[in-house]
């Protein structure tokens, strides 16, 4: 792998993680509204779901950016994203909800690519395995 193509996985991880990190920060900024929304779809324990969402979005997003335990993190985030799509964006009569559903499905697809191919050379996982960019 040449040096230029070594940057591609790192940049891809950053782009995928950005939406999760910003979403998690938005949840921190509006905890009552977020918990209310979680409760409005009928999920039990909105506070617990809220905390789990922040952990996955911010914690997982940061781990994805730095490339630590990337395959496991990406798999958890892909699962979270599909579950989120199913619970929060399932009203296909609303075009906006359908777009959000498809966005989540596409993000899960990108995360599954990370699961399949790993973090790449510019990551903590890459350093631990001895793969460094040339």
Image (cartoon, rainbow, N blue to C red):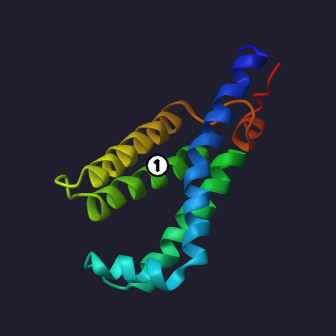
Left or right: residue 19 versus residue 36 is right
Which residue is at a point 62% across and 63% down the rendered structure image?
59
Query: Among all residues in the image, which is located at the extreme front?
Result: 95
Up the image or down, 112 lies above or below 50; here it is above
Front-lying residue, 30 or 60: 30
| Residue 77, x across and y down, in percent | 48, 54
| Residue 43, x across and y down, in percent | 29, 78
Which corner quadrant of the image does residue 70 belong to? top right
**Residue for badge 1:** 75
| Residue 127, x across and y down, in percent | 78, 37
Up the image or down, 29 lies above or below 12; here it is below
Query: Among all residues in the image, which is located at the extreme right?
Result: 134
Front-lying residue, 53 or 25: 25
Which secondary structure lies at badge 1?
helix
Left or right: residue 45 versus residue 15 is left
Which residue is at a point 64% across and 31% down the rendered structure image?
9
Which residue is at a point 46% across and 81% down the rendered structure image?
33
Which residue is at a point 45% across and 77% down the rendered structure image?
34
Q: Residues within 10 Å of mark 1 (few under 14, many from 20)?
A: some
Up the image or down, 15 lies above or below 101; here it is above
| Residue 129, x across and y down, in percent | 72, 35
Left or right: residue 57 versus residue 98 is right
The quadrant the N terminus occupies is top right
The quadrant the C terminus occupies is top right
Q: Is residue 112 visible?
A: yes
Q: How many marks?
A: 1
């Amino acid at each position: 792998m040449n040096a230029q193509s070594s940057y591609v996985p790192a940049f891809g991880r950053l782009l995928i993680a950005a939406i999760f990190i910003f979403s998690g920060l938005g949840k921190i900024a509006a905890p009552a509204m977020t918990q209310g929304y979680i409760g409005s779809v009928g999920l039990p324990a909105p506070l617990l779901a809220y905390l789990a969402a922040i952990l996955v979005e911010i914690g997982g997003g940061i781990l994805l950016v730095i490339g630590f335990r990337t395959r496991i993190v990406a798999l958890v985030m892909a699962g979270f994203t599909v579950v989120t799509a199913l619970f929060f964006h399932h009203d296909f009569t609303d075009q906006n909800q359908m777009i959000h559903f498809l966005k989540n499905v596409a993000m899960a697809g990108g995360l599954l690519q990370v699961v399949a191919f790993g973090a790449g050379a510019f990551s903590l996982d890459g350093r631990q395995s001895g793969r460094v960019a040339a």
